[in-house]
Amino acid sequence: MASNDRIFPGGWLVPLEYVQDYISDFVRDKPQDAERYRLNWLFQRGILKSKARKRKTQSTEQPAPDPGIPALLHQWLKHLPHRPYCTDDLGQGLHVRSRKQALAYRYIQHNPPTQIWDIVLDVDHRIDLQSLVEPIPNALALNPENGHGHLFYFLKAGVTCTQAGREAPQRYLAAVERGLCVKMDADDRYAGLISKNLVHPYWSTHVLHDHCWTLGELAEHLNLDAANARRYVPEAPEEAYQTGRNVYLFHTVRQWAYSEIRHYWAPNGLPRWQDAILGYLRPINGQFHAPLYESELRAIAKSIAKWTWRHITPAGLQDFIERTHTPELQAERGKRATNQAEAGRMATNQLEIAPLGGIASGKARRQSREQERATARLLRAQGYTQEQIAKELGVSRRTIGFWLSDDL
């Protein structure tokens, strides 16, 4: 120990030139916890510096593949999850292992949870390599016993499949997957989570070419219109296939979540909101031919909950209402609805009104009044005063009060 250092109780060193300052501050502040005070005092003056803790980082080193495997499969290995699902027997359930350990199993999770890099098709009949049609898959993993197998299409760029990703690429991907499934006569009940391990010796693996596909290139071989494909949403749960299930869930839940979230705006409301979304997703998921696993469903619920919680706020909703529901806009909408309804009635009843004269005209006026009453109730529900409503509809305030009193 240096001679100019002074040890105080607790073992912390205070250099001699700082001792007087420390004593003065200690007498002035009269701390309850002397140990904590001394430590903070030393840190604040830079006398005692904490050592930066070494953060454990997840190794990004790829497992060393067999030198004999084709170079294209190195990319497949690169995009595997860090801790993928894997198994030797699908009937015995799935395990979660490190990437290195998982490669020893026959079946493995080929895409990470948040992105799609590989489109995989499950073909339940013997595959003839000479009879494959365009688009030709990059690789195949065949069962040596029956010739059934998985077709792999490697994408040039991954598609984010969470709420944080753009919706158009997800829908485009879903349309391409569906088109490939039909053209290649693949199993439309295949879940897409687990595939045959391309580097496992049990399977007969064939690498056909090393061209990584864009969605547009695949769509050309499937006669898909790109603009329509980017808007693709399965019409029913039974039609949803692989990524189409995520698209269907996001599209369906979105309609419900935008209004439902208001019931959960409260301190610490996010966990309850996430549970509510999960409860809404489960019965929809049960309608798919190949339901998503519970872990996938929880990940989707978490993604939707966090996105909506961040983007749909009380202040944002109030601003939206104020911008889209001004008295002028609402009155214009009311007048437009009234005019359209009146025009439709006049066109329909024109032949009846002519011979009936005043009776028919009175009936039309009463129908018009009913439409105005409905418009008045709508404006009132949006928070407008009776005076504002009367001015917009061109009637007296007393009439508005009479119309609204019918609802009491």
Image: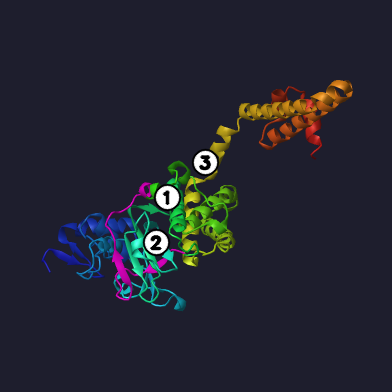
For marks 1 and 3, the one nearer the N-term is 1
Q: Which is more toward the observer, 132 or 181?
A: 132
- Residue 120's tag is 2
Dot 3 amino acid type: Gly
For marks 2 and 3, the one nearer the N-term is 2
Category of crowding for the residue at label 3, using alpha-carbon neighbours closer than 10 angstroms: few (below 14), some (14–19), many (at least 20): few
Give the number of the mark in front: 1 or 2: 1
For marks 1 and 2, the one nearer the N-term is 2
Give the number of the mark in front: 1 or 3: 1
Please state the extent of the stretch shown in magenta in the rendering: 191-217
Dot 1 amino acid type: Leu
Q: Is mark 1 on a helix, strand or loop?
A: loop
Q: For the C terminus, which image quadrant?
A: top right
Category of crowding for the residue at label 1, using alpha-carbon neighbours closer than 10 angstroms: few (below 14), some (14–19), many (at least 20): some
Left or right: 208 with respect to 14?
right
Q: How far apart are marks 2 and 3 (CA)?
A: 41 Å
The answer to whether one can see residue 340 in this image is: yes
Left or right: 337 with respect to 167?
right
Q: Residue at x 62, y 26 (%)?
A: 328
Most common SS among magenta residues: loop
Q: Residue at x 81, y 37 (%)?
A: 406
Q: Mark 3 points at which residue?
A: 316
Dot 2 amino acid type: Val
Q: What element carries label 3?
A: helix
Q: Residue at the front extreme?
A: 130
- Residue 222's tag is 1
Residue 306 position in % (x across, y down): 47, 53
Give the number of the mark in front: 2 or 3: 2
Residue 385 position in % (x across, y down): 70, 30
Residue 11: say if magenta: no
Q: Which residue is drawn at 23% across and 54% down?
A: 45
